[in-house]
Image: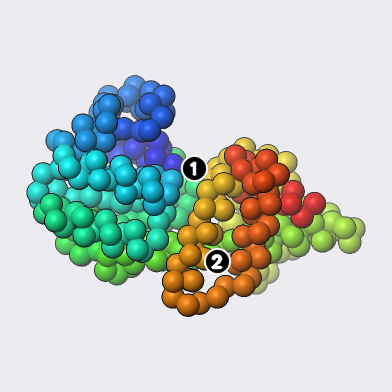
Amino acid sequence: MGTPMARRIARAGHSLTVWNRALARTQALVAEPAISAAATPAEAAAQADVVITMLADPVAVLSVAEQALAAMAPGTLLLEMSTVDPATIHSLAARAAQRGIELVDAPVSGSRRPAEEGTLLILAAGERAGVERVRPLLETMGEVHYVGPSGSGAAMKLVLNGLGAHMLTGFTSMLVLGKRLGLAPERILEVVQSGAFSSPQFTTKGSKILARDFSPDFRMALFLKDQELVLKTAESLGMPLPVLESIRVQIAAAVTAGWGELDLSALIQQFE
């Protein structure tokens, strides 16, 4: 996700220094005229007006951001775009504030193709002035929605992720049920998309399922991580989510079966 997002920022006319834990992943980017690579997060952040983090999980975010914050000048801004929980954002915002650095959390909804096309849904949160400061950067990557004070972006992303898991699990399991009842999957998709239960997700994932193309737009292992974040956050609020817990079990079984690096649409194989 970070690679196409970085490419869109650079192609909009911004100078960009990139760093990735897997150095090879920066090679495709440094061919761009406005992009250079750094050896460490601190080196990448040292001369930046805005530092953007797009990482896999809260542990990675806190580790990398801490290194970046140490090199950032007061008055600069940290734009955190990963999928993490609100508690991680609140912790990171406090660390940033101690150094005179503002944090905007702006996680994205979408996968690789929307990232390439600049059509991500961006859930921006924090002080409005800070969000407006980085809006030109955000708009190179997608459609910006201001969702509230710091941590609200992470909260909204958890809501979307939990809802999406319910939808995908229902869709894939019902495709399998329909097939066992003698219905053609193509006809099931056609009818679903013609009525009240239609969804863009079903079009995108349905097409991959019909083609048996499970090349990853968004990996199953990250899909599992996202649901575990939702469940952990809900538990901290004393709110049980028994349906999502059952869904998590199915996703975890799919990862255990060896499908963690496949697209999340490969969940259908769990029901098959």
Q: What amino acid type is highlighted by mark number 2?
A: Leu
Crowdedness near tag 1: few (<14), some (14–19) or many (≥20) residues, C-alpha within 10 Å: some
Q: Identify the residue at image location x=31%, y=59%.
A: 89
Q: What amino acid type is highlighted by mark number 1?
A: Arg
Q: Position of residue 267 (x, y in %)?
A: 68, 51
The residue nearer to you, when weighing 184 against 161, is 161
Displayed quadrant of residue 126 = bottom left
Residue underneath mark 1: 112
- Could you tell me if the residues under marks 2 and 1 are in contact, i.e. CB atoms within 8 Å? no
Q: Which element carries disc 1, helix, strand or loop?
A: helix
Displayed quadrant of residue 131 = bottom left
Q: Identify the residue at image location x=23%, y=58%.
A: 93
Left or right side of 9 for 127: left
Q: How many marks?
A: 2
Q: Identify the residue at image location x=80%, y=51%.
A: 272
Q: Is residue 50 visible?
A: no
Left or right side of 48 for 179: right
Q: Is residue 238 visible?
A: yes
Specify the farthest residue to the right: 182
Q: Position of residue 225 (x, y in %)?
A: 52, 53
Q: Earlier in the sequence, mark 2 or mark 1?
A: 1
- Quadrant (top left, top right, bottom left, bottom right) of the N terminus: top left
Q: Which element carries disc 2, helix, strand or loop?
A: helix
Left or right side of 187 for 106: left
The residue nearer to you, when weighing 252 against 136, is 252
Q: Position of residue 80 (x, y in %)?
A: 31, 51
Disc number placed over residue 163 in the picture, else none: 2
Gap in angstroms between the C-alphas marked 2 and 1: 19 Å
Left or right side of 268 for 155: left
The residue nearer to you, when weighing 166 against 239, is 239
Q: Identify the residue at image location x=64%, y=53%.
A: 252
